[in-house]
Image (tube, rainbow, N blue to C red):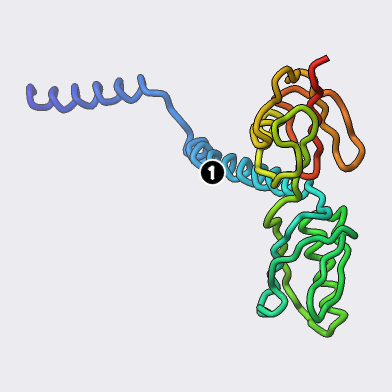
């Protein structure tokens, strides 16, 4: 009798232990395991989409230099500067308007031009190699035109130009764009390719 009671007691204890643990349906476990990858996948797609949209916002203009890669044709691939007239000149293809286009649009324009030259199924990629310079003038040590650097602010532009002249007001800044936008600025105001930074002298 003592031997029979011992296994029965173990069985009852085991049941009690299972009853104290929360029960999760098999379907819920599968959904919980499947959900994180799906969510990660969606956020990855959003990040990629946002990055692509941001890259496409930059409009090309005179002074920008682009790298053109034509798949399978090294003779056409190369570095091209956009002329004052807003064009790039690709040997054996001709001139192509680039001003106001982003890199994706310029890629498509080059591909269309190549197809007119009997080059079918051509794949073209364009990226900005160097941005057009910015200009700084007014009460700085060395006013003039300088190569653009990424993430530039008015403060960076002043530093590149050798700093402020004695008596200059760093609060009296104006940043104007080639498209006609113009307004008061602070030291942390972004400066974009082709912009002009003006530092007013002391009044």
Q: Quadrant of residue 145?
A: top right
Residue 159 in picture, x, y percent from top left: 64, 32
Q: Name the residue tied to disc 1.
A: 37
Name the residue at the top extreme. 203
Residue at (65%, 42%) from the top-left corner? 150
Horizontal relation, residue 114 to residue 39: left or right: right
Residue 28 in picture, x, y percent from top left: 52, 35
Query: Residue 37 versus residue 64: which sits nearer the camera?
Result: 64
Horizontal relation, residue 79 to residue 180: left or right: left
Horizontal relation, residue 72 to residue 195: left or right: left
Q: From this view, report whether residue 122 is shown above or below residue 137.
A: below
Residue 112 in picture, x, y percent from top left: 85, 72
Q: Residues within 10 Å of mark 1 (few under 14, many from 20)?
A: few
Q: Quadrant of residue 149?
A: top right
Residue at (79%, 34%) from the top-left corner? 137
Q: Quadrant of residue 177?
A: top right
Residue at (80%, 39%) from the top-left corner? 195
For mark 1, give the secondary structure. helix
Q: From this view, report whether residue 79 is shown above or below residue 19.
A: below
Q: Quadrant of the N terminus?
A: top left
Residue 58 in picture, x, y percent from top left: 78, 47
Name the residue at the bottom extreme. 118
Query: Residue 131 versus residue 11: which sits nearer the camera?
Result: 131
């Amino acid at each position: 009798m003592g031997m029979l009671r011992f296994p029965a007691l173990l069985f009852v204890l085991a049941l009690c232990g299972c009853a104290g643990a929360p029960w999760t349906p098999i379907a819920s476990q599968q959904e919980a395991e499947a959900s994180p990858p799906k969510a990660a996948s969606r956020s990855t797609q959003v990040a990629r989409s946002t990055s692509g949209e941001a890259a496409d916002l930059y409009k090309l203009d005179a002074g920008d230099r682009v790298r053109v890669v034509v798949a399978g044709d090294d003779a056409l691939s190369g570095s091209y500067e956009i002329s004052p007239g807003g064009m790039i000149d690709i040997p054996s293809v001709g001139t192509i308007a680039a001003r106001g286009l982003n890199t994706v649009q310029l890629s498509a324009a080059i591909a269309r031009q190549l197809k007119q030259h009997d080059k079918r199924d051509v794949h073209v990629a364009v990226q900005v190699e160097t941005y057009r310079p910015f200009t700084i003038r007014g009460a700085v040590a060395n006013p003039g035109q300088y190569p653009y650097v990424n993430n530039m602010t008015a403060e960076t532009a002043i530093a590149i130009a050798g700093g402020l002249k004695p008596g200059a007001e760093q609060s009296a800044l104006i940043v104007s764009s080639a498209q006609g936008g113009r307004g008061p600025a602070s030291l942390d105001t972004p400066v974009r390719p082709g912009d002009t930074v003006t530092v007013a002298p002391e009044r």
